[in-house]
Image (cartoon, rainbow, N blue to C red):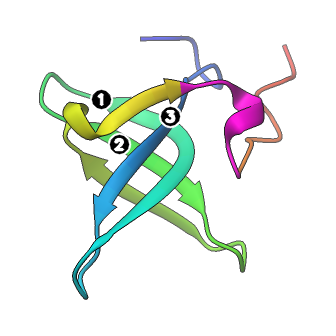
Amino acid sequence: MPPYRREPYISADIALAAGGTAHITGKAGGWTTTAALVQWADTEGARHNVWVEPAHVRRIRREESTWQDPYDLHP
């Protein structure tokens, strides 16, 4: 596991309750061998978390994410 506040940024395709999928970008809040916890903020600033299968997740650079953790740049 990376140090606190140094978790990787990721993108994922998630299933929507109303049907279809959405592409999101955010930060990995945690992971297991079977899932990654994706954390992101919507356009109103509300925070969301969802567990996603690893096959639907890929690592991205911080600059590619629509949301950046304001604290992860500080030592």
Check if mark 3's residue and mark 2's residue have beta carbons within 8 Å: no
Check if mark 2's residue and mark 1's residue have beta carbons within 8 Å: yes
Circle 3 packing at 10 Å, graded few (<14), some (14-19), many (20+), is many
Residue occupied by mark 3: 10
Q: How many numbered circles does the render carry?
A: 3
Above or below residue 69? Residue 45 is below
Left or right, 12 with reference to 15: right
Q: Which mark is residue 31?
A: 1
Classify residue 14 by image quadrant. bottom left
The boundaries of the magenta stretch are 60-66
The span from disc 1 to disc 3 (Cα, nearest Å) is: 12 Å
In the rendered view of the protein, which quadrant contains the N terminus? top left
Q: Residue type at mark 1?
A: Trp
Q: Residue type at mark 3?
A: Ile
Residue occupied by mark 2: 37
- Give residue 48's position: percent from left, percent from top: 49, 64
Residue plotted at (21% across, 33% down)? 55
Q: Nearer the viewer, mark 1 or mark 3?
A: 3
Q: Nearer the viewer, mark 3 or mark 2?
A: 3
